[in-house]
Amino acid sequence: MALAFCKRALRVKRGTCSWAVLREAGVMPFQYYWFLAALRMWNGAIEGKGGDLVKSVMKADLELARAGMQKCWTHQVWQGLQGLQGEAGFKQAMVNKGPVLLTGKDGLAVALKRRYMGVWQGMDEVDPRGPGANKLARHHVWFAAGMRDPAVPRALFPRARYLYAPLTPEVMRNNARFRLSGHRLRVETSTWEQAETDRACDACIVSLGEHIQDEQHIALECEHVLLRDLREEFSDVFDAWRDTDGSFRAFMDLESCRLPRYISRCMAIMDEWTDAAVHDAVARPAAQ
């Protein structure tokens, strides 16, 4: 439910990579809150806050799990704990009919956050333009904000800065599409066509087919006449970028209020270009 809401709020396709959407929106997976709520209920029941009947029911369910019953509530919780840092301690606390530690550096909340951090493990070394890179790696290396310390009692992922800006729905949607690979650039559409080698930009007027048509290329390099004119119009953004290390990541991290509008204009130009290319491809066989 929370994931579907984030996709609707960002106005991206339902098929957009879920982990990238959650990180972009600064939202933890729904499972995180469910797990904490489930163990909070256990703690309350064991401590007698729900009355003697509830306490007796939870203890009886625990005995079923210990006897090997797989369809009881406690066994399902144990399955969810598998692979977590501190799994043995959490399970032992339940076996001992005691409360499970939820907060603190050794608590369940931190353990769950470390599990989610594992999704992004090793992506710092991935070349986002390499043959093995996927949309999740591109989002991590080029766009996503750094993760917080899991011990901090806040969401693991800071929300993307442009989501706080007073932007029109169209500008916000275009930025979300650009950052979450919800576009029709060749780096993405080539995967639909199962021809990942055909990622070359067909919009460059000089070096046609020599560069990968990805987000970095469109924002900084493409020779399409409208994109070149656009870079001149937003010269103040590029002037600020020249004071950085010159990487695409540094460009996307600029705090300029005009950067989201620049990205949106880039997307609009490429959408128009792609629509025209598709129309020509359809019209060509009909003319023959």
Image: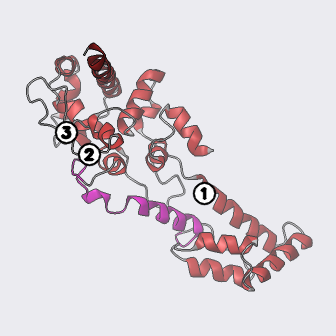
Q: Is residue 254 magenta?
A: no
Crowding around mark 3 (Cα neighbors within 10 Å: few <14, some 14 to 19, many 20+) is many
Mark yes or no: residue 207 visible.
yes
Residue 179, given in percent of the width and then of the height, sits at 36, 38
According to the image, label 3 marks what residue? 212
Whichever of callouts 2 and 3 sits on the residue coming sooner in the sequence is 2
Find the magenta span and give its range: 105-131
What is the crowding at mark 2: few (fewer than 14 residues within 10 Å), some, or many (at least 20)? some
Residue type at tag 3: Ile
Q: Secondary structure at mark 3?
A: loop
- Where is 285 relative to 188, above or below? above
Q: CA distance from mark 3 to mark 1?
A: 37 Å
| Contact flag, marks 1 and 2 (Cβ < 8 Å) | no
Look at discs 1 and 2 and give the one toward the viewer. 2
**What residue is disc 2 on?**
196
The outermost residue toward the front is 288
Q: Is residue 2 above or below residue 173?
A: below
Q: Position of residue 168 (x, y in %)?
A: 46, 20
- Residue placed under numbered mark 1 in the picture: 31
Residue 167 or residue 169, whichever sits in front = 169
> Quick check: 11 left or right of 192?
right
Q: Please state if 228 lies on the left or on the right of 47 as rendered.
A: left
The x, y position of residue 236, in whole percent, is: 21, 23
**What residue sits 43% from the left and 27% below the top?**
172
- Locate residue 80: give its quadrant: bottom right
Magenta run includes residue 112: yes
Name which of mark 3 and mark 1 comes first in the sequence: 1
Name the front one of labels 2 and 3.
2
